[in-house]
Amino acid sequence: MRFILLFFLFSTSVQAARPEFICSMKYGRSYYRELKELPLKDKTKPCSLSCFLAIKCSAVESFHVGVIKEIIDLFGEGNAETSDIRANLDGITLADSGRALSKSECLKECKLIHQR
């Protein structure tokens, strides 16, 4: 099992170095800091971040960022949750469907989805 996870991490990090993944590296951290300061419910943050990145970068890039974050949480101090991946997919869907076209719309729609 560990070998599979290490292989996945290695292959994902190689992909992250490709030019098309530079966008998420450029914007992901600043978007994360913005969201961290807001009083949002737990799943609203990954939903919003994924939505922001899907609009600015791409859905694929956004998905990879969410998965990598959960893997880091699994091995680090964070709390890895499959429900965060679901929230990431919600955000990506909002952006891809055109339901959210800006950061404010991402926040609004993610709050509606994850208000419970």
Image (tube, rainbow, N blue to C red):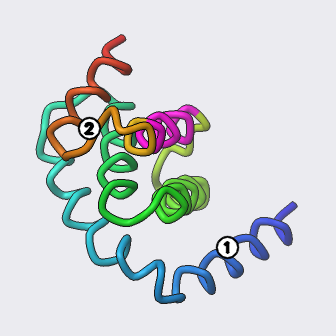
Mark 1 crowd level (few <14, some 14–19, many ≥20, 10 Å Cα): some
Circle number at residue 91: none
**Is residue 38 rendered magenta in the image?**
no
Would you say the magenta stretch is mainly helix, strand or loop?
Answer: helix
Name the spot of residue 16 as percent of width and height, x first. Answer: 53, 80
The residue lying toward the viewer, choosing from 68 and 88, is: 88
Instruction: Give the quarter of the image for residue 15.
Output: bottom right
**Is residue 84 rendered magenta in the image?**
yes
Residue with the mark numbered 2: 106
Circle number at residue 9: 1
What residue appears at the point 53 percent right and 88 percent down from the top-left corner? 18
Say which quadrant the N terminus sits in.
bottom right
User: With respect to residue 88, does 58 lie above or below?
Assistant: below
Name the spot of residue 26 as percent of width and height, x first. Answer: 28, 77
What residue appears at the point 28 percent right and 27 percent down from the top-left corner? 109
The residue lying toward the viewer, choosing from 43 and 54, is: 54
User: With respect to residue 100, does 15 lie above or below?
Assistant: below
The residue tagged with tag 1: helix, strand or loop? helix
Q: Is residue 67 left or right of residue 51?
A: right
Q: Amino acid at mark 2?
A: Cys
Whole-Å distance between the Cαs marked 2 and 1?
A: 28 Å
Q: Amino acid at mark 1?
A: Leu
What residue appears at the point 14 percent right and 39 percent down from the top-left corner? 104
The residue lying toward the viewer, choosing from 6 and 67, is: 67
What residue appears at the point 37 percent right and 66 percent down from the top-left corner? 57
Name the spot of residue 110 as percent of width and height, x first. Answer: 31, 29
Q: Which residues are magenta?
A: 83-93
